Amino acid sequence: MNNELLFEIGTEEIPAGFLSKAVVDMEEMIRKALTEKRIAFETIHCLATPRRLVLHIADVAPKQDDQIVEKMGPAKKAAFDEEGRPTKAALGFARGQGLEVSELETVTNDKGEYLCARKTIAGQPTADLLPDILKNFLLSIPFRKSMRWAAYDLRFARPIHWLLALYGGQVVPLKVEDIESGNTSRGHRFMSPETFSVEGYEDYLAKAREHFVIADPAERKKFILEEAQKSAAEVGGKLFYTEDLLETIAFIVEYPVIVRGGFDPHYLQIPKEVLTTTMISHQKYFPIVDEEGKLLPHFIAVSNTRARNLDVVARGNERVLQARLADASFFFEEDKKIPLENRVESLKKVVFHTLLGTSHKKVMRFRKLAVKIASKVKPAVKKNVDRAALLAKADLESLMVGEFSELQGIMGREYALLAGEKPEIADAIYEHYLPIVAGGSLPGTDEGAIVGIADKMDTIVGFFAVGMPPSGTADPYALRRQALGVINIILSRRYDLSLNFLIDECLASLKDVLKKPAEDVKKDVLEFFRGRLQNQLISQGYAYDTVDAVLAADIDHLVSVIEKIQALQAFRANPEFEPLSVAFKRIDNILKDFRGGSVDVNLLSQEAEIKLFANFENIGTRVEKGIAEKDFTAALNKLAALRSPVDAFFDSVMVMDKDEKIRFNRLSLLADISALFHQIADFSKIVTAG
C-alpha cells in the first residue's frame, strides 16, 4: 500500500460523452496540484465508470519538499560602513527577514555584490494538505454541462452520493456540502448495490469486481471487444466497430454483458450506411459483417446488467432495432419515389440561416462559385461540378435525412445513383461535406473537392458578412473546421487557387446581406485563414517565426505559401540566413512608413549606393525569375547575395541625408529592396541574435 492515494467520487450516471475527457483532465489537474504543492509522487491512474470517477496515485511523499526562499537585500557597499559595521540598511533588512546580520549571505550578480537572506521553509505533512487538495480537485473537474441538485450550491456533472478518500490506508477527512469522505464504496446499482469497505487500491479493484464493477475503462474495452468478437464469430461474422463506438459503450456500462441479436434479412436491401448508422449512432450496437465487409443480419448489444435470461434481453433489443429499421425502410422506399433533382426546388422552403436566406439560395451561390473554380483548376470537370453542386443539398429534404441527419450526403449519393446520375456526380454529393471532422478524410475526386471548397467558402464568408464570426471557443457553425477543410483540400490537390478570388466571388454573391464594407469582411476572412494555417503549420513542426514571416507577406495562393515556408525553413541552415535577416531588419527599421518612389540613378553619388543599386538590378531580375517559376530556394539563394552590398551601404552611406531629394532617393532604393524580400517573406518576423 505504501503511501498511495485513492480517491473515488461516487455519482449518479454520468453521460458517456463526459467521461473520456474527464479522465484526461483529472490526471492533468492532480499532477499540477501536487507539483505546485511540492509533493512528490509516482504514477497516476484515473479511472471512470458511469457512476464513479477514480483517482489513484502511487507512492505520494509523506511531506512537502522543503522550500528555499531567497530575498535580495541592499548592495554590500551600502550594507556596511568603512569599518565593516552593518548599516541601518543591513540591520533593517535582517530584521525584516527574521535573521541576524551574520546569517545573511553575500551573492554576486551582474550588478555587483548584494546581501541575500536565504531561508528554508520546512514542508508540511501531506496528510494535512490533502483535504483541501482533493476538495479543490473535485470542484474543478470541468464538464461541458454541470448541474445543481437539492439545496446545494455545488455544481457537478451529476449528483454526488459518496466519497472514498484514503491516503496510506487512512481516511482523508473532507466534506463537500453534507457528503463526508470515508473508506467505503458501492457496488453495481442493480446487481450489488450494497456498500463495501476498502483498504487500498488493489483491494478496491478486487472488491469492486466482486460487486460487479470493472472500474478500469481500458479493461472494460478489452473485455467488450474480445467477447463481442467471439460472439460475432459464432454466426460466421466479424465485428464492425470504431474506436469511438467501443469507447462510448465502455463508458456506458460498469459490468459489460454481451448480447447478440438479429434482424430480418430483408432489411439488408437498405443501404449499408443506413443500417450501420441506425445500429451505431442510435442504438450503440456493433454491426456484424462477413469477410467481404457485407452486413449480416446480426448485431451485438452490450448490457450493463446480467439478466437471468439473456434471450429475453436479446429479443428486447431486437424489437427496438426492428422498429428503427422499419422506419428506415419506409423512408427509403418513399424517398425513391421522388427523383433527387425534384427536391432542389423544395430547398426554397428550408432556411439555411435567417440572415443568409434559404438553402436554395445558398446552393445557387456556391454552384456559381464552383463552376468558376472548376474553370480555373479543372475545366474538364466543369459540367459535372455544376450538376453535383445543384444536387449537393437536395437530400436534406428527404425523409431519411430528416430522421437521420448523419446521413446527409450519404443518402444524396445513394439517391443520385438510383436516379441514374454519373458516379462522379454521386460521389461528389457525398464528398463535398468532407472532411467531416478535423483531420478527417478529404474528397477523392475533383468534383467533390471543388464543390466542397465552394460550399465551405460560401458558409465562412457568409457568416463573416453578417457579423457572426467565431469568438473565443464559440464556433457554432464550425467555421474553423471548414476553413481547415478548404486549406487542406487545396493543398492536397495542389490547386493554383487564389483566396482573394474565392472571397471576392463570395462577397459579390452576398452583397445584399453585408453588415459592414466588403473590404473589411475580406480582411477579416483572410486573417481568419491566416490564423488557421499558422496553427496547423506550427503543429506540424515548422518554426513559428518562419511561418509568421511567410504568412505576413502572403496568404493568397496556399500551395505557393507552403513552398515558400519549406524553402525558408531549409534556408535557415545557410550561414547567410542570419546576417541576411539582420540586414533586412535594418532596411525595414529605417523605412518605417515610407512608401517610396522610383530611383533616380543620377542622384546616386557614393560608390556603395551605386554598387547596391547595380546588384539589386542584377539580382532582382533573377530573384523574380525564381519566384515566377516557384523555385523559392533559388530565389532565396539569390537574395543572399544582396547582404554584403546592403551592409556596405549602411556602413558608408548616410541614408537620412540633409538634401531631401538624396534622402528620398536612398529610401526609395531601400524600399525597392524591401519589396523584393517581401515577395517571399517578411524577414522582420524572423527571430535573430542581432
Image (cartoon, helix red, strand yellow):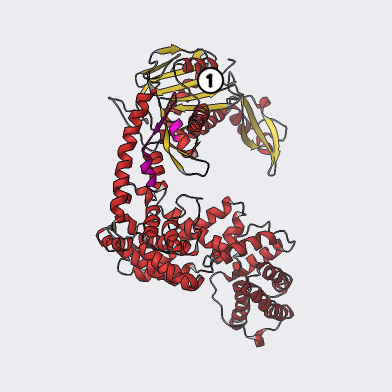
Q: Quadrant of the C terminus?
A: bottom right
Question: Residue 637 location in percent, x, y?
Answer: 71, 68
Look at the image and give the residue range highlighted in magenta.
Answer: 248-270
Q: Position of residue 166 (x, y in %)?
A: 50, 16
- Residue 12 visible in the current orientation: no
- Residue 125, quarter of the rendered image: top right
Q: Amino acid at mark 1?
A: Leu
Determine crowd level at label 1: few under 14, some 14-19, many 20+ residues with C-alpha closer than 10 A.
many
Instruction: Give the side of residue 299 with respect to residue 541, left or right.
Output: left
Q: Secondary structure at mark 1?
A: strand
The answer, for residue 231, to whether it is visible in the render is: yes
Q: Nearer the viewer, residue 538 or 336?
A: 336
- Is residue 255 one of those drawn in magenta? yes
How far from the left and from the top, in percent, is residue 551? 55, 62
Q: Is residue 497 above or below residue 71?
A: below
| Residue at x 37% of width, y 24% of height | 311
Residue 373 in the image: x percent, y percent?
46, 70
Please give the residue where the numbered disc 1 appears in the rendered image: 5
Quarter of the image with the N terminus in it: top right
Residue 340 shown left or right of residue 185 in the figure = left
- Left or right relative to 110: residue 27: left
The answer to which of 294 and 102 lies nearer the viewer is 294
